[in-house]
Structure formats: C-alpha cells, structure tokens
Image: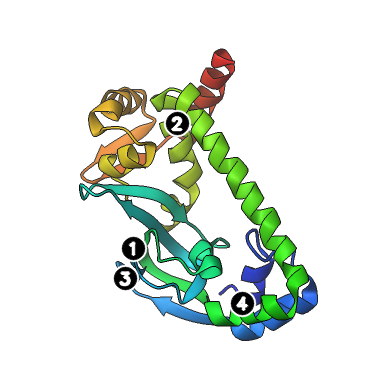
Amino acid sequence: MTSIRDQLSSSGLFQDFPEMAKRELEKLCRLQSVKSETAIYKIGDEPKALYGVVDGAVKLIGEAPTGKLFLYELVSPGQWFGENSALDGAPRGQTAMVIGDTQIVSLLRKDLLDLLHSQPDLYQYFVRVLCLRLRRAGKAIEETAFLPVSVRMGRTLLRMHRVREKYQIKLSQDEIAASLGVTRQSIYRVLKDWKARGWVNLNYGNVELSDSLSLTRWVQETQAELG
C-alpha cells in the first residue's frame, strides 16, 4: 500500500513542496477506501476537500445542458484531483466517480488554506502546477484544431492504457467520442479499421487496446507526416 508521504512526493500538486511542508500535509491527510461506482463529489457540490488516488482510478465527468456526458480525465495513482474548487471555493464543475474499489487520500480545504495562509510562500508551487496545466490545455486546443480525430483518439487510448489495463477499466465508444468532442459515428470507422489491424478489440461497452506498440508507431508516424 502506498503511503500518504509517497502520494505527496509523487508527480502532482505537492511534489516540489519543501520537506517540512510535506510533513505538515502528511499529518492533515487521511486515507480512505471507496467502493466502486461511488461519487466522491458531484457537479455543483460545495468543495470540502481535494483528493489523490493512491490505488485504483477515478473518472472526472462533465455534463452538457442536454444531458450528454463528457469524460475529462481518468485519474490514476499518484495524481490529485478537485484542487481547483478547493483553492477558489467555486462549486464542483465535474463529477468524480470511483471505478473499481479505490483507495484515495483526502485533504480538507480548510486545512489546506490554513497552511497556505500561514506559509504564503507555498502558493508559488501551485502557480507552477497551474501554469503547466494551462499550457497543456492550450496544447489540447491546438491538437483539436490541427490533428485528425484518429490521431487524437490514438493518443487518448495510449495515455489511459496502463491504468485501464491494470485495473480492468472499461471505456465505451460513447465515452471516447465525448472526450474528443465528436460523435460516436466519427470514430466508429477508425475503430473498425483498427480492429481489422488487430490494434483494438471492440467489446460491449468497452474499447480494449490490444496492440499498443503498433498504435504508438502509427500515431508517431502520422504526426510526423502532418508536420
């Protein structure tokens, strides 16, 4: 079992914090086990804490006014989530749903803000992380504009592959399409072609990546051709 200290020191929000600050955070954090399909929080909820995945996975899901769901991210061990609302106090913009029995670490918003107010120098570390995420968001917008859906889908499947394989996480065609901002029909022909090549298996409610090496090569070669 990964310790709270390991979670604080892994990639994410608190990795670059001074050791003294990590020791204080370690005392404030709590480990808890959460059953599969449990919503840690829902869209519109008041932010009470931020969370890190120690073991298992969490889906971050948005919802359009039409009721259509959007898969933002699959949070894997070592990563944190819910920090934006925990910092600014705004209502949750996504639903965090546990996939499979999962162990998380939680840090109450009040405890985090008290620590930051007592040690304002710590804010600089959040600024670095948030700037990095803004750059990644900008890169994602560029990819949407310049990369074909097939390449973006390949990158998405590859990014999630390791954690999905380890925890047997299903990902439907509807979820993949929603995460790319396209219709299911837009990705079906590509998936059908990839299935014929032996890169994916299309099961009921699940797109399983069966040959990650071939798909990786194809994505890299296609991106190189596009310049």
The residue where tag 1 is placed is 43
Q: Which circle's residue, 1 or 3, is located before the other in the chain?
A: 3
What element does badge 2 sit on?
A: helix
Q: Is residue 53 visible?
A: no
The residue where tag 4 is placed is 113
Q: Which circle's residue, 3 or 2, is located before the other in the chain?
A: 3
Identify the amino acid type marked 3.
Thr
Residue 152 bears which disc, if any?
A: 2
Q: Is residue 18 visible?
A: yes
Q: Quarter holding the N terminus?
A: bottom right
Measure how far apart labels 4 and 2 are at the Cα level: 37 Å
Measure how far apart labels 3 and 4 are at the Cα level: 27 Å
Q: Is residue 204 left or right of residue 13?
A: left
Identify the amino acid type marked 2.
Arg
Q: Residue at coordinates 58% horizontally, 62% vertically from top-left? A: 78
Q: Which circle's residue, 1 or 4, is located before the other in the chain?
A: 1
Q: Position of residue 20 (x, y in %)?
A: 79, 78
What element does badge 4 sit on?
A: helix
Residues 52 and 50: in front is: 50
Q: Position of residue 71 (x, y in %)?
A: 36, 49
Tell me whether the residue at label 1 lies in contact with that at label 3, contact meaning CB atoms closer than 8 angstroms: no
Identify the amino acid type marked 1.
Ile
- Select label 4 or label 2 by which is in front: 4
The residue where tag 3 is placed is 38
Residue located farthest toward the top when viewing the structure as drawn: 225
Residue 28 bears which disc, if any?
A: none
Measure how far apart labels 3 and 2 are at the Cα level: 29 Å
